Image (cartoon, helix red, strand yellow):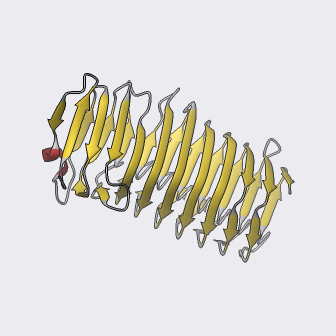
Amino acid sequence: PSNTVSFSDSAGTFSDVSGSFTGTGTSASYGFSSDGTLFFCPGSYTGLIAVSAASAAIVGTGGSSSTELSGASAGSVISASTGAAGPDVAGLTLSDGAATNGGCISSVIAGLVFSGSDLALTGCVASGNGGGIYFEDATSVAVADASFSDCEANKGAGIFLEEVAMDLSDLDLSDNIAVDRGGGICTKNSDGTASGLWVSENWSQNDGGGLFFEGSEVELTDSLVSDNVADDKGGGVYLKNRNTDLDLSTTLVQDNEALSGAGMFVDDSTALC
């Protein structure tokens, strides 16, 4: 049924928790502390989810196009706290989260393994970093088939990753705004792959209108970086520090704008095209 949220515990027993996601104006936090799966039927919901369970999945049964969870500007829509080892998130639109870091999804849990798919993150704001997604010290972060739009942050308006092994694929990052760096994505000391990215019409008021990589080794393939703007350096891509290596293949960087390095600004780093 629509507008119903059910929790299935590790034994397969279901319970109705819809009442935790009917808030207006401000959002109460649902404590996801027991192993299991949270199922959202198609509909629109308001609330925050704080995950501390070791095994947790959050699933929109009808997919992101029919299921939306709003944070009502009351915190990170989904956050991982002590005890969490995941979670896996799929089939949801997450909107209007507001936090210091990670307006839509956030975690600073060491050793976390996160996977997300069929997601739409929109209108989320961080006064610090990671308007859409913020992960620090996670073991791995894998995000596929997701869009990030109208998100804002100081660094990494769409995605911010620090000390993370990343696997990003088939992402659309558009119309996001960073105050400092990384209108679409900002990474620090994070290595991995990115393929099938569409990075377009993002803006940084400083550096890296589309992508900002620092201290990171990244393989970027089958992607488009276009029409991004940086008020200072690196309209499309900014590479910073000598241990930063970017390997681009079958990727187009075009029609970006910046004061210096409209397409790419390479600062003591290596770019292999």
Point out residue 233 in the picture as x, y percentages from the top left corner.
Answer: 73, 66
Point out residue 187 in the picture as x, y percentages from the top left corner.
Answer: 64, 47
Is residue 36 in view?
yes
Q: Is residue 52 above or below residue 167?
A: above
> Residue 225 versus residue 119: which sits nearer the camera?
119
Q: Is residue 5 left or right of residue 208?
A: left
- Which quadrant of the figure contains the C terminus? bottom right
For the image, the number of numbered tags is 0
Point out residue 129 in the picture as x, y percentages from the top left corner.
Answer: 51, 51
Where on the picture, by quarter, is residue 35?
Answer: top left
Q: Is residue 233 above or below residue 114?
A: below
Is residue 205 in view?
no
User: What's the residue at 54%, 37% (across, down)?
Assistant: 136
Where on the picture, by quarter, is residue 201?
Answer: bottom right
User: What's the residue at 75%, 68% (across, down)?
Assistant: 253
Q: Is residue 257 above or below residue 78?
A: below
User: What's the residue at 66%, 75% (across, down)?
Assistant: 227
User: What's the residue at 73%, 55% (across, down)?
Assistant: 221
Point out residue 164 in the picture as x, y percentages from the top left corner.
Answer: 61, 37
Q: Is residue 223 left or right of residue 1?
A: right
